[in-house]
Image: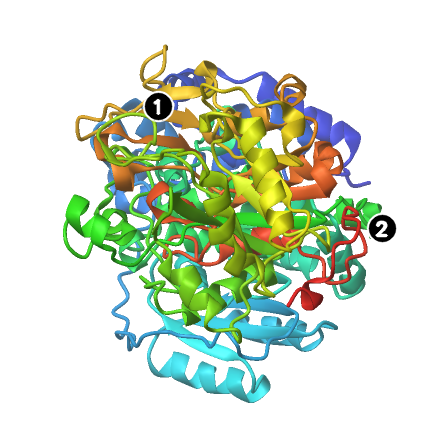
Amino acid sequence: MTNNLNGAVARLSRFLRVLFLNRAERKFLRAARASGQFDPVFYKGAYPAIHSWFHMVPLRHYIVYGEKRGYRPNPDFSPSAYLRYNPDVADIGMSPFYHYVVGGHKEARVTKEMPKVEELPQVARGVLRFDADRPRARFALVAHVYYPEIWPEFAERIGQLPIDADLFVTLTYRGKESDDLAKEIQAQFPAATVLPVVNRGRDILPFMTLVNAGALDGYDAVAKIHTKKSPHREDGDHWRQHLIDGILPQQGLEPLLDAFLADRDSAFWVADGQHYTGTEWWGSNFEITQHLMRRLEIEVDWDNLSFPAGSIYWMKPLMVGLLKAMRLEEDNFDIELAQVDGTIAHALERAMGYLAMTADQRVVQTSELAAAGGTPALSLPRPGFTSAFYLPQFHPIAENDAWWGKGFTEWRGVVGARSLFDGHTQPLLPSDLGFYDLRVTEVMGQQAALARDAGIDAFCVYHYWFDGRRVLEQPLDRLLTRPEIDFPFYLCWANESWRRNWDGLSGEVLLDQTYATGFEQKLVTDSLPYMRDPRYSRPDGTRPRFMIYRPEDMPDPAGSVARMRAAWRAAGIGEVELGAVCFHVEGENPVADDIFDFWVEMPPHGIVTLNDYLYGGPDGNQLDRDVRGGFEGLVYDYNRVIENAIDPKYVSNLPENTICGAMPSWDNTARRGARAHMAYGANPARFGVWLRHLAETRLQRSYRGELFLNAWNEWAEKAVLEPSVTYGDLYLQVLRDHIADPAAADRVAAPGAPALAERA
């Protein structure tokens, strides 16, 4: 009769063996514990075949059984390699790891196989570009091939996919071998993009190369796989197949993808067991991850780690966009020396989880999607009408020439802004529209097209009028002569004095705002050519809209409003929908809420509290890093501002007829330099969180279900929705996801509001 080696009795016997060590093994145990060189998390993860009983005593298991089987006590120690490179240890028959912990580490002994230095040919480095308007499939699949022998396995799987997906294959370049494989792949998949890459950054840099080039823009979701072998794991092939089977199953892929896309809370989809949580998975990657995340003004919390492990997953477009915004190039990645931890590539793996958490999203596993069964999330309300403040600057005028130097526009400050601390994303520079001049009216048509596609219905354009004197009027006046350019707009009288410090409240007055008797009639007369233009917006379908920035500054707000309404009626305009901004500083002349048809919330005005300051507030420097350049300004937490925006106490103090607002960011470093005020922590993902919170808590109580955005193009205040070098059009993508609704099926009702196509 033979013994059952896997039976309960045998397993119990082996477990008791590790509990009762002999004298030499106990000395080994004490030395290993004292050294801190044994990594129990790695050991349990690298060798999943070990029975769960031994997970309670992994070091004991290693001493008795693991080392004899060639297992590694940590990612950087190979028992067989230690003996091979240190023959004196082999000669005395001593345990390799015991020798290392008692003395070998002090002698800097070699602990693992020395990496093979492959003399690989150089890769031809052309500029990689993809046509943004090219036809696309619904999905993209990216496969990185480091081990060419695994490609047939990939080819079979890819060839059986039931979904419409564009294929991108990156090959670690090995000369003729890679050239031949590229031809083979192209023959198998003629529409595939095959790209040779350098052996650097594992599978991450090749993926980032495609991301940075825009190859993965515009897809509903992107799948990423690679020829994973994981030499430090004895089950490397099985692990790879498990990871790929999890996200590209041979049966049931389509309903799982539908469930993934329907789940607004999910950012990554991984195989079961590949969502890692817990600080034990940080390894030596915390500081590098922290540095990476600050590129997006995201702070890393040591006590909160969650990420998709294995680097094989599906990801949503927002995650692709955030990766692109990190702008990681080849030079950022470590040279490959067979590292198993502590590189940019390893840190970026952990960073993926922070990208998801920043968007208030999560990593979801296959079984979770299957359990969800594709149940669609409840639809959130969308605005009935969305406006964005618009700055008609960006062209020279005589006044600015005199005050700031000939040829001055906002762009001069924008390009001169400098980062003042680690993670301060300055300068923010334009991309798609470039450094435009708004005297070129075609630019306004391009802006409107971008805005319309993202769900914005009209621009609220600042109207600079000083008792009959107009400034910055050229863009709109030229628009009136170009009826073919579709630019929906209405006016906001920016009735504050221009001052040298740019805040309208203090400093040398450059252009004073006065209110001479009869100013109301003159202002109304000046507004008439714009209101009579068919592009002038009537959000309720009937009344043209007009806003006043600082109504409290008028000597007689109620009387002035009444006289303006009468003047518009007398001019044949009829009733005007009149609104005002909820400003953060009370003027000399209080205004009753019911004087105006509506009020507009304009973050950050009135929404930042003393508790929100990270620098310059009552608690001093809370940034946990140095601030450069003699900074004397204020830094507050963008994320706290989001919380304030939905705080019932704050909301209860707003006029009942208020349009709720949001800002993509705020930072006037370009104007005020070392005295700037800024919101830290702003990025497209957090902006999306703000929009979602408004939809969940405030939009239905907002005036006529409307939303107001501050702003479209305040570049010198970094309150910008237009495409930028840093974020591309990601802010617009986020906005589109939250407010645009071509079917208009779930928009908050705006009685009488015409469809966008009818507003011309």
Q: Is the residue 286 above or below the residue 2 in the image?
A: above
Residue 499 lies left or right of residue 405; in this view the side is: right
654 in relation to 246, above or below: above
Indicate the quadrant where residue 631 lies.
top left
What residue is shown at x 25% (from left), y 69% (from top)?
119
User: Within 10 Å of the Cα at label 1, are there few (<14), some (14-19), or many (20+) other Cα atoms?
Assistant: some
Give the residue at x 31% y 61%.
435
**Separation of marks 1 and 2 at Cα, in angstroms:** 44 Å
Q: Position of residue 144 (x, y in %)?
A: 48, 66
Q: Is residue 300 above or below residue 494?
A: above
Q: Quadrant of the N terminus?
A: top right
Q: Which image quarter is the C terminus in?
A: bottom right
Q: Is residue 252 visible?
A: yes
Q: Is residue 62 visible?
A: no
Which residue matches tag 2?
A: 373
Label at residue 307: none
Q: Which of 128 and 433 lies nearest the eye of the viewer?
A: 433
Numbered disc in front, either 1 or 2: 1
From the viewer's perspective, is 144 left or right of 412? right
Report the amino acid beneath label 1.
Answer: Leu
Q: Are marks 1 and 2 in contact (CB under 8 Å)?
A: no
Task: Mark 1 or mark 2: name the one nearer the start of the chain.
Answer: 2
Return the x and y of residue 754 as percentages of the image width and height: 74, 59
> In the drawing, does residue 76 fall left or right of residue 361?
left
Q: Which residue is mark 1?
A: 623
Q: Circle 1 — which element? A: loop
